[in-house]
Image (cartoon, helix red, strand yellow):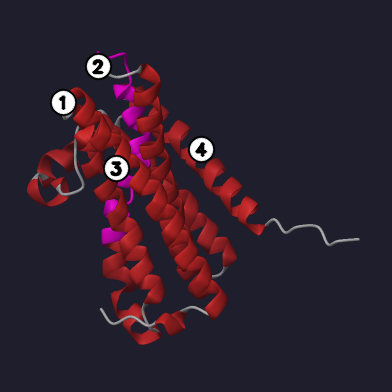
Amino acid sequence: MQTSAAAFSRPELRQRLNLLLVLGASLALSVVLIVFRVFLTQKIYFVFLLWNLFLALIPFGLSTMLGLAAGPVRARVLLPVGAVWLLFFPNAPYILTDLFHLEPRSGVPYWYDLALILTCAWNGLMLAYASLLDMQNLVQRRMGSAASWVFVVVALLLSSFGIYLGRFLRFNSWDIITNPLTLFYDILNRVLHPAAHPRTWGVTLLFGVFLVIGYSTVRLLGRLQPAPAE
């Protein structure tokens, strides 16, 4: 895919680079904490979080490429890349549920594991929001502000449903190719018989509302401007 920095203005490009630096530093902290824990305990228990962080980087990388792509290129790839983005997007906020793995373990302080998982969960959430912001901006330029917020809500609700599928049914993003019939059956069963699956819709709605409120908060914080000096 051909990309062009001209897709961003100079201030936007500077903000993008600053964001990459901060996210890179935050991801580096998570990696250091995980590696140090392996060195300290001689156990690789939390190494799976590195894979989860890698999966969380995929939608961010896709949305960044779409944002940098020149107009004609972006128009041709927006739908297929957007579909892949939506497929992998739940992997980013999914890391929040890795808090389920928190429990006292020998060889490392409880607070250390808490900090380790929290940094990974934070990185997953921030990668999700940064990626969603890129996609919302693309939708807004093409369809307007109202449609972009509908897209945000739908994407986060679908992401929450994906979190349920991953955490409780143990599906992965690639199961749509490797195990499509079972995935389709389980989804259809829950759509057609919602009353029989209260946990499905409890997780989906609760996490969806939380993610929408969190994203809206981050958007508002980003727009706050310092008061003019008197």
Asked which secondary structure carries label 2, the reply is loop
Camera-near label (3 vs 4) is: 3
In magenta, the rendered stretch is 84-107
Question: Which of the marked residues, 3 or 4, is nearer the chain's N terminus?
Answer: 3
Instruction: Identify which residue, 18 or 35, lies in the foreground.
Output: 35
Instruction: Identify which residue, 22 or 132, lies in the foreground.
Output: 22
Residue matched to label 2: 107
Residue matched to label 1: 43
Camera-near label (1 vs 4) is: 1
- What residue lies at 46% left-to-right and 39% top-to-bottom? 208
User: Label 4 is placed on what type of residue?
Assistant: Val
Quarter of the picture holding the C terminus: bottom right
In the image, is residue 186 above or below residue 51? Answer: above
User: Label 3 is placed on what type of residue?
Assistant: Val
Q: Which numbered disc covers residue 209?
A: 4
- What residue lies at 19% left-to-right and 33% top-to-bottom? 170
Residue 29 in percent (x, y) is at: 37, 43
